[in-house]
Amino acid sequence: MIESLKQLLAHLYDVKGLIEWGGPVLVCAIVFIETGMFVGFFLPGDSLLVTAGVFAGAGHTSIAALLIFVTLCAIAGDQLGYFIGRMAGQGLYKREDSHFFKKRHLERAHEFYEKYGGKTVILARFVPIIRTFCPPVAGAAKMSYSRYLIYDIFGGFLWVWSMTLLGYTLGRSVPNIDKRIHIVIAAVVVASLLPAAYSAWKARSQAQVISPTRTKTEEK
């Protein structure tokens, strides 16, 4: 079982191979699953979009198809996640961990939502894992659907178009970049992890500041 999961993940993170094999249809499917189902938090959303854009810039696939259909799938996926959260409510937080569901990811998305409010729906698009769990958190919190939908449509367009057009620009302006796509993927992965790394560092710094203060108070 574990070996099969490792092989599956290896194939999923072969972003170049995925796009060459499945084209825009597979990109749409992966984006929908990542944004609409709990099992999608490990999927390569950002790197997939940038890589697809690079291939479109190099003439291997249609940029129009990517922008239109992937945006629709990103928005549709979030709607599914929202309604799952709306129906399941607080029961989601009592669900047991499994291979494809981790309660800590849901709690992390909830903290993100509490901190940034409605803007989370837009900001979460650019943070791996958070973008998968933000929609059900918004649904469980009973955020107004009309308000959620407006934020989500804007966020979907912003995420898909910025990532894909970044790759498209690189594909058009850098000769043979599609042959060195592993460098682009590595850069995107690092960039996508920076917000999470910064949040972790900030939380740790705040904890270190609070801890000595508590110690001094206890001593008194």
Image (cartoon, grey):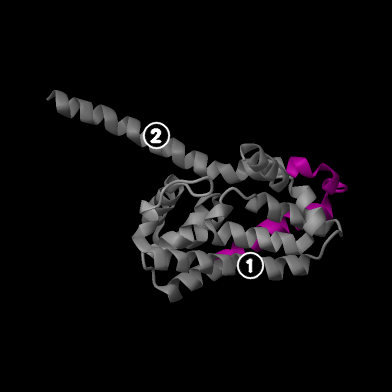
Instruction: Judge from the rendering whether residue 132 lies leftward or rightward of residue 138; answer left or right.
Output: right
Work out whether residue 115 can be spotted.
Answer: no
Magenta part of the chain: 155-184
The answer to the question of whether label 1 and label 2 lie on touching residues, with beta carbons closer than 8 A, is no
The residue furthest bottom is: 146
Q: Residue at x 51, y 61 (%)?
A: 122
The answer to which of 98 and 195 lies nearer the viewer is: 98
Residue 187: x and y, percent? Answer: 68, 42
Which disc, if any, is residue 35?
none
Disc number lying in front (1 or 2):
1
Q: Secondary structure at mark 1?
A: helix
Which disc, if any, is residue 204?
2
Which disc, if any, is residue 73?
1
Using the numbered discs, state the Cα–Cα distance from disc 1 to disc 2 in whole angstroms.
Answer: 36 Å
Residue 144: x and y, percent? Answer: 39, 72
Q: Residue at x 52, y 67 (%)?
A: 80
Report the number of numbered marks. Answer: 2
Amino acid at circle 1: Cys
